[in-house]
Image (spheres, rainbow, N blue to C red):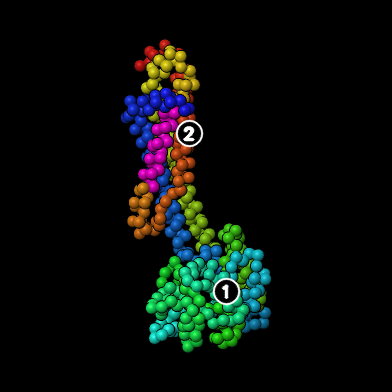
Amino acid sequence: MFDLDLWREIFQSINKNRTRSVLSGFTVAFAILLFAILFGIANGLQNTFKEAFGTDANNSIVIFPGMTTKAHKGLQAGRLIRFKNEDHDFIMDEFGDKVQYMTSKVNRNVTASFKGEKNNYQLRAVHPEYMFIENNVVCEGRYVNQNDLNHKTKVAVIGKVVNDELFAKENAIGKYVSLNGISFKVVGIFTDDEGDNEERVIYVPLTTAQLLYGNTDFIDFMHLTYSPEMNSDAALAFGADITKKLKDRFSVARSDQRAIMVQNFAQGTKQVEIMTFGLTVIIFVIGIGTLIAGVVGVSNIMIFIVKERTKEIGIRKALGASPKSIVSIILLESILITTIAGYFGLLLGIGVLEWVGPGLEKYSIKDPGVSSSLIFGATLALIIAGAIAGYFPAKKASNIKPIVALRND
């Protein structure tokens, strides 16, 4: 394998038969090129589907209270359902082993002011876990913590846009901002990949907002993420269990769809899974067809190469070369050409995807790309298939008697 004379002979053979070598390599390179582009486009479409969820956790379930539309257990229709802190605790007691993060929320619109600067923002009163559900990134200071909830402290975590508009001339951390006339200490600044709208938000501890806005334990809605280990079917069943338990808790008819509304992101995840699976199957079939075409091309060229070198094989045998050495030199030459051409096709495919990638976003194809491991596997399959296809004619030719091979036209 590492015989220097053997490899020198292989390179000399390639150099003398440039046209044949180029044709062999072109077949492989073109197959890998198409394979990379097809799977890159498929991955781009999958990225588009996933982006539809935004940067928020896509294993989310949001639970909204509503109004009953049907009488049930002697209770009239039209009852207003309102959640309390105890309902948050109820969910955690019943399903804590399936919940990853959970928060209750109270939303308000507030006017925030600081040293003459004033603007309107959304205030969200939350638990500390909301940071992971919303995927907020704290760039300065800290987030709301459990100690804030326990002591109902008046602290605020502001979005980057709020910071830029109210605190353009000084550091906001440690300063006091007025929210509807009530002073809150700024303890953190966060960013959000979803843009300015999500950065025009102010977070405060849930218990603080409940105390200041009515001294109650009411909440607007609950937001949780389920265990990432759940598949979409298990997550949908989990959401149905939550709905059933809450309807029983509030004496709501099972068929009443307006009293307690559960938005389960797993439904969208399942649809994306179905779409991406179908797309992957289609692309895989096309890709395999492309590779098969490449294998057929390599096979035909291998047969031609062996036939073309029959006289050479006869001379080698007449000089004492073993059948094994004859087969190995032909296959090594083929494998070398296929490997180099496959790598070239891979680089070309990745280059094409990077070049046309930005322009494909208008066609809902975002960041098209393909893993090098997949393409390496496809190239390896081509090399093996080509080697196997060429082995049999090479083996047959190596067994021909030298006198017969030398007479071959």
Under mark 1, the amino acid is Asn
Q: Is residue 344 magenta?
A: yes
Does residue 388 lie above or below 309 as drawn? below
**Residue 107 can be seen, yes or no:** no
Locate the C terminus by quadrant. top left
Helix, strand, or loop for circle 1? loop
The residue that mark 1 highlights is 145
Quadrant of residue 84 in the image? bottom right
Under mark 2, the amino acid is Ile
Q: For the residue carrying disc 1, how many other residues have a C-alpha within 10 Å: few (<14), some (14-19), or many (20+)?
A: some
Helix, strand, or loop for circle 2? helix
> Which one is closest to the eye, mark 1 or mark 2?
1
Q: Residue furthest top?
A: 403
User: What residue appears at the point 38 percent right and 40 percent down from the top-left corner?
Assistant: 344
Marks 1 and 2 sit apart, C-alpha to C-alpha, by 58 Å
The residue that mark 2 highlights is 384
Seen from the viewer's position, the closer of residues 343 and 367 is 343
> What is the tally of numbered marks visible in this picture?
2
Magenta range is: 331-350
Most frequent secondary structure within the magenta stretch: helix
